[in-house]
Amino acid sequence: MRRTRLVHRLSIAGTAALVVAFGACAPEEEAEDNTGEVAEADECAVEDLPLKNPGTLTIGTDSPAYEPWFVDNDPTNGKGFESAVAYAVAEEMGFEQDQVEWIKVGFNSLFKPGATDFDFDINQVSITAKRDESVDFSEGYYSAAQAVITLKDSPAADATSLEELAGFKLGAQTGTTSLTAIRDIIQPEQEPLVFDDTNVAKQAMENGQVDAILADLPTAFYISAVEIPGSQLIGQFQPETGEQEQFGMLFEQGSELLPCVNRALETLKEDGTLADIEEQWLSDVVSVPELQ
């Protein structure tokens, strides 16, 4: 591997004497964070990959799978940004389309430590230091921003800054960086409402329970342009430290497959494939104004 930070397992051999002496159980093996590892080409032959199911690349995502990340709630059709990226990665790694299997994984269950049923999950998951404590991430495949959606006849529609938004009732899906952005960046006067998923959040906004909701920019753009005709985007902003937020594929911690996925992503960035996929599925979002 190019950057060698190989998975290291907690050695129990050296503690054998202590185990005997104290009559305790040996400590469980612990996996080290493999985020950032990139494999060499000769380390990624399909027949040698550590897959959950031999010969099959098993990919997780939530259901419903929203546009523009997926189309028709069907990850297998290759349509939508994340479906297209997943199949491009699979092809680069040497998999045929019929060697890719999708499974349903709820977003809110993604960050539990331990073994997973998927090789990786792709579901607009932002890479954060906190999440990286329990799971591993691929290199970022999309630079995300947060966006604010409201109804056109809402008083919040006149807001032009993050400071003005602080006076309104806001909401977002639980466990998301959108919710973190409300609390840490906007810091509203009222406690934000927390929803199980984006569909519930949209309904709450239409019902007047919240003045505005937050989501990643492409999702917010789709909600405004397609799903809720009477809504509008107030604007976009970068959360947390001001550094560019990135979406990454999520792996169980210590995944030895991750370095080969990073290698595939690196190739797709260098040859322009990733940019072409982004332009095809996400190009409409670039004109949304910045909120300060």
Image (cartoon, rainbow, N blue to C red):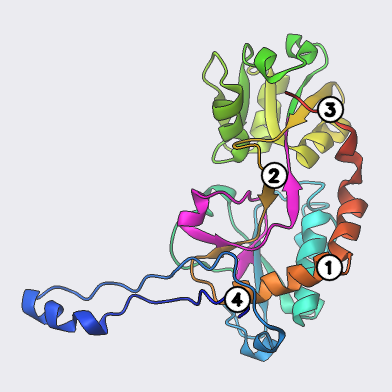
Residue, x 54% and y 15% (percent of image)? 190
Disc 1 element: helix
Residue 254 shows up from this direction: yes
Q: Earlier in the sequence, mark 3 or mark 4?
A: 4
Does 162 lie within the magenta span?
no
Q: Residues within 10 Å of mark 2 (few under 14, many from 20)?
A: few
Q: Identify the residue under disc 3.
A: 289
Above/below status of 218 relative to 12: above
Front tag of 1 and 4? 1
- Give percent across and percent down for residue 179: 58, 33
Tell me the residue that label 2 is attached to: 244
Q: CA distance from mark 1 to mark 4?
A: 21 Å
Q: In the image, what residue type sits under mark 4? A: Leu
Instruction: Point out the frontmost of discs 2 and 4.
Output: 2
Residue drawn at (77%, 82%) of the image: 94
How crowded is the residue under tag 1: few (<14 C-alpha within 10 Å), some, or many (20+)?
A: few
Q: Quadrant of the N terminus?
A: bottom right
